[in-house]
Image (cartoon, rainbow, N blue to C red):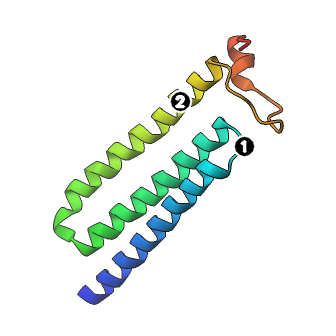
Amino acid sequence: MAEFLDILGALLLLAGTIFLLLGGLGLVRMPDIYNRIQAGTKATTLGTLLSLIGVAFLHPEWSLKLLLIGVFLLFTNPLSSQVLARAAHRTGAHKSSSMIVDHLEDDLGEKP
């Protein structure tokens, strides 16, 4: 049973690192700050959670601490990305030409 948990933990760690790599690639490849925030937040949140679960399978005695880290991560990552996007919008950051609708500008009546 321990060998199965080790293999599962290693696979989850591998999947987590792949998502973290893709998140980093998204930060470089995306056309504007809003897409970069999206790629950085979604992929790194999933990658970090998968890595934490993988470590929990490898070291079951750390599970409670890893669970607390994961909960903290789930609360802070989306909030920080929303704050960054809102700040970028207020400062008039460059928008991609594919951005057609701006609901925040419509809701607040702001013109950057």
Give the residue pinned by disc 1.
Answer: 31
Amino acid of disc 1: Pro
What's the distance in space between the residues labelled 2 and 1, CA to CA? 16 Å
Label 1: few (<14), some (14–19) or many (≥20) C-alpha neighbours in 10 Å: some
Q: Residue at 72% across / 18% down in the picture?
A: 105
- Which residue is situated farthest in the front direction here? 28
Indicate the secondary structure of the residue bearing disc 1: loop
Q: Quadrant of residue 63?
A: bottom left
- Establish if 61 lies above or below 26: below
Residue 80 vertical placement versus 19 (above, below): above
Q: Quadrant of the C terminus?
A: top right
Judge the density around disc 2: few (<14), some (14-19), many (≥20) Cα neighbours within 10 Å.
some
Q: Nearer the viewer, residue 100 or 29?
A: 29
Q: Position of residue 38 (x, y in %)?
A: 60, 43
Q: Is residue 5 above or below residue 75?
A: below
The residue shown at (30%, 81%) is 5
What residue sits 67% from the left and 51% below the top?
29
**How many numbered markers are drawn?**
2
